[in-house]
Image (cartoon, rainbow, N blue to C red):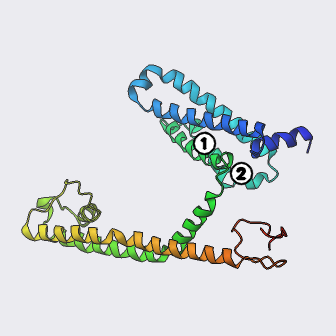
């Protein structure tokens, strides 16, 4: 790789010097402005008065991001890994809606997905230590997925039974025209939202509604408790793994999870 291309790749992909940080900040400002323009363009009064200027600005930002996307592909060592990786797909989705809007009306508003590119700010502000906490949360959700599936299955069963009962008790005369519509009412009532577009009128129907409301309050804490217990277990496993990290040179324990060298003798940790 030529030195100029190597230096350019460092600026685009890294953030450990002034030039690369300036590039990232410049990019983030452009992302913020482009998302702001899309939000403004969705307001009908602003669209009718300044629509042409906003449309031109949107195409300007799209061309800039397109050039940046092509540049990243050209500079990437692993082009396939970038194109099909998370950030590569986000970068692609950030520019596609504007081009698709040439064929499908209003699809340009999907460019708000560019807001996902703000995840790059973790690299700029050196907040990568929070990634460890995100990993713990992800592991907790993964460990609790079976319990959550059972919980959702139980909720769906309650909704099906209550919706069917309300369809039988109230019937089409009171707005419960079908079992799916009655299930919609059961979901709305069970989640304590209560739109009020459908309401039971018979005494027995109101009794069933009261039961499902109380059931809704009772089950709110279930998924929270499941995730909380798994999160506590994940943290305990992390702490245990940290305590198991031993320097084989001086036998010192309790090293930090992201430590590469021993805090006592300085030798590399396995």
Give me the disc on residue 259: none
Question: Which tag, 1 or 2, sits closer to the chain's start?
Answer: 2
Residue 72 in the image: above or below residue 161: above
Question: Which residue is under mark 1?
Answer: 94
Residue 147: name its quadrant: bottom left
Please tell me which residue is depicted at 55% across the width and 44% down the height of the picture. Answer: 113
Q: Position of residue 77 (x, y in %)?
A: 82, 51
Please tell me which residue is depicted at 12% across the width and 60% down the height of the picture. Answer: 174
Q: Quadrant of the N terminus?
A: top right
Instruction: Report the front residue among 219 and 22.
Output: 22
Residue 169: name its quadrant: bottom left
Residue 15 in the image: above or below residue 34: below
Give me the disc on residue 83: 2
Please tell me which residue is depicted at 76% across the width and 42% down the height of the picture. Answer: 12
Q: Tell me if 135 is positioned left or right of 14 in this view.
A: left
Instruction: Report the front residue among 181 and 11.
Output: 11
Q: Position of residue 264 (x, y in %)?
A: 79, 70
Please tell me which residue is depicted at 85% across the width and 77% down the height of the picture. Answer: 249
Residue 59: name its quadrant: top right
Residue 172 in the image: above or below residue 10: below
Q: Tell me if 120 is positioned left or right of 53 in this view.
A: right
Instruction: Report the front residue among 257 and 54.
Output: 257
Task: Label 2, secondary structure: give it.
Answer: helix
């Amino acid at each position: 790789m030529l030195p100029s291309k190597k230096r350019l790749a460092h600026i685009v992909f890294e953030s450990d010097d002034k030039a690369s940080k300036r590039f990232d900040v410049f990019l983030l400002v452009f992302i913020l402005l482009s998302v702001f323009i899309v939000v403004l363009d969705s307001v009908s009064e602003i669209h009718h008065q300044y629509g042409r200027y906003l449309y031109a600005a949107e195409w300007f930002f799209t061309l800039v991001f397109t050039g940046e996307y092509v540049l990243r592909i050209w500079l990437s060592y692993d082009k396939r890994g970038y194109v099909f990786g998370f950030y590569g797909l986000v970068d692609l989705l950030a520019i596609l809606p504007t081009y698709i809007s040439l064929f499908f009306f209003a699809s340009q508003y999907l460019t708000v997905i560019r807001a996902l590119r703000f995840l790059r700010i973790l690299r700029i502000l050196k907040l990568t230590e929070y990634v460890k906490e995100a990993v713990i949360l992800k592991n907790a959700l993964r460990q609790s997925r079976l319990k959550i599936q059972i919980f959702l299955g139980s909720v769906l069963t309650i909704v099906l039974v209550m919706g069917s009962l309300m369809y039988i008790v109230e019937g089409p005369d009171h707005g419960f025209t079908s079992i799916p519509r009655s299930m919609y009412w059961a979901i709305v009532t069970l989640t304590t939202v209560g739109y009020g577009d459908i309401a039971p009128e018979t005494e027995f129907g109101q009794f069933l509604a009261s039961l499902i409301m109380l059931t809704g309050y009772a089950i709110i804490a279930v998924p929270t408790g499941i995730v909380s217990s798994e999160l506590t277990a994940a943290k305990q496993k992390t702490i245990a793994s940290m305590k198991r990290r031993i320097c084989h040179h001086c036998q010192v324990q309790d090293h930090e999870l992201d430590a590469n060298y021993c805090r006592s003798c300085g030798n590399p940790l396995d």
